[in-house]
Image (spheres, rainbow, N blue to C red):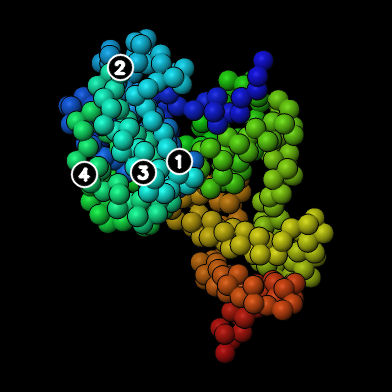
């Protein structure tokens, strides 16, 4: 049996299965239900959040001959079957990254004049539309503004700012959200359950954070971890495979800073370097750790933590030991260190000096109080 990567195998096929874009899917379903379809749409947002997927679902649904009560495609009619088998003549996809010339757009314009063989609409999905040349955009303008009644254009892009204002004004624009860590973790749990994989929640949390808001990236990393660890995924296996610094290092460092133990903090950093981690990656992670501790100081901001339940408890316990002044000063030091890291000649010394400064925050505070 042919292996299919999770990002393709579990790609949404209905509006209801699209994760994290509820506002957009509801709007599109209402437009279909009320027969208020625009002739051009612009889907923009980060990579891997469902722009092309939503475009395909929308194209499939508007041509479905037996829509369900909740405005979903039936998957039974001839139009749906041809779409599911990738043989639909109603849906045309163009990759603007490799077809960005005037001639490519002219070919598309010639196609637009031909009415659909089945269903009501011919849908033209143009991916990475920002890659079209200036002259190609200009050639496309008139058709985009006044297409035949059977033609609908869906433009998808990750770089909205590169789209000409004249194109933007002719489209209904939908801004897709980044996928939150919570949504990504829940979807990864669903995929793991379907694949018969046992996974620790902390492990899935690290994968979701590493994906940085892209569901496709999260599923690709999940496949990578399954290939590495088999049907049982642990937190340790994930951080080893993805070369992610263990939270434990940061907790130990903060304990050393609170004890004013500069020697221990330098030894911990040396251990981190010996494990092959980059100094910039480390100082950025330490800044994030102080930020998370600061969030834990207020009950209203605890929800801003993007970590699992067991790790969250450790954050809450350590946050009780840290005064706000300590955390503000620590964030100032780490942020300054991070900003100047690239220009520092001796990068190790640059970070070590920051660690020494962090270990002296309480000492310096006592000095100021005594004075």
Q: Residues within 10 Å of mark 1 (few under 14, many from 20)?
A: some
Query: Which numbered tag is attached to residue 218?
Result: none
Q: Which mark is residue 105?
A: 3
Residue 72 is left or right of residue 314, and the answer is left
Q: Position of residue 241 (x, y in %)?
A: 73, 43
The alpha-carbon separation of the residues under discs 3 and 1 comes to 11 Å
> Residue 358's spot in the image, x, y percent?
65, 72
Cα distance in 3D space between marks 1 and 4: 21 Å
Mark positioned earlier in the residue sequence (3 or 1): 1
Q: Which residue is mark 2?
A: 118
Dot 3: what SS?
helix
Which quadrant holds the N terminus? top right
| Circle 3 or circle 1, nearest the eye | 3
Secondary structure beneath disc 1?
Answer: strand
- Residue at the disc numbered 1: 95
Q: Where's residue 330, x and y in %?
A: 58, 70
Mark 2 or mark 3: name the one nearer the start of the chain.
3
Q: Nearer the viewer, residue 164 or 247?
A: 164
Q: Are marks 2 and 3 in contact (CB under 8 Å)?
A: no
Q: Residue at x 68, y 50 (%)?
A: 244
Point out the frontmost of discs 2 and 3: 3
């Amino acid at each position: 049996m042919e292996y299919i990567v999770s990002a393709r195998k579990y790609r949404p096929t209905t509006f209801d299965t699209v994760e994290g874009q509820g506002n957009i899917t509801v709007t599109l379903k209402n437009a279909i239900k009320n027969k208020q379809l625009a002739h051009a749409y612009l889907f923009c947002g980060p990579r891997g959040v469902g722009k092309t997927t939503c475009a395909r679902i929308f194209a499939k649904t508007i041509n479905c001959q037996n829509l369900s009560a909740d405005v979903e495609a039936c998957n039974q009619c001839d139009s749906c079957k041809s779409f599911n088998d990738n043989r639909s003549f109603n849906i045309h996809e163009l990759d603007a990254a490799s077809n960005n010339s005037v001639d490519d757009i002219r070919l598309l314009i010639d196609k637009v004049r031909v009415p659909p063989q089945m269903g009501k609409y011919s849908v033209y999905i143009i991916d990475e539309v920002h890659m079209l040349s200036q002259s190609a955009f200009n050639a496309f303008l008139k058709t985009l503004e006044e297409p035949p009644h059977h033609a609908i254009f869906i433009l998808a892009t990750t770089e909205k700012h590169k789209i000409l204002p004249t194109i933007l004004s002719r489209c209904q624009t939908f801004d897709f959200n980044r996928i939150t860590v919570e949504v990504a973790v829940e979807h990864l749990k669903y995929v793991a359950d379907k694949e018969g994989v046992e996974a620790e929640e902390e492990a899935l949390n690290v994968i979701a954070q590493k994906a940085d808001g892209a569901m496709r990236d999260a599923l690709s990393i999940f496949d990578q971890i399954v290939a590495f660890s088999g049907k049982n995924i642990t937190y340790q296996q994930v951080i080893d495979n993805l070369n992610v610094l263990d939270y434990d290092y940061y907790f130990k460092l903060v304990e050393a800073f609170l004890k004013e133990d500069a020697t221990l903090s330098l030894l911990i950093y040396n251990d981190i370097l010996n494990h092959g981690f980059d100094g910039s990656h480390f100082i950025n992670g330490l800044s994030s750790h102080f930020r998370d501790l600061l969030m834990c100081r207020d009950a209203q901001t605890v929800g801003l933590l993007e970590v699992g339940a067991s790790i969250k408890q450790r954050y809450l316990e350590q946050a009780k030991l840290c005064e706000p002044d300590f955390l503000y000063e620590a964030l100032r030091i780490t942020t300054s260190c991070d900003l100047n890291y690239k220009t520092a000649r001796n990068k190790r010394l640059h970070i070590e000096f920051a660690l020494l400064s962090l270990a002296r925050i309480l000492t310096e505070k006592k000095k100021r109080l005594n004075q």
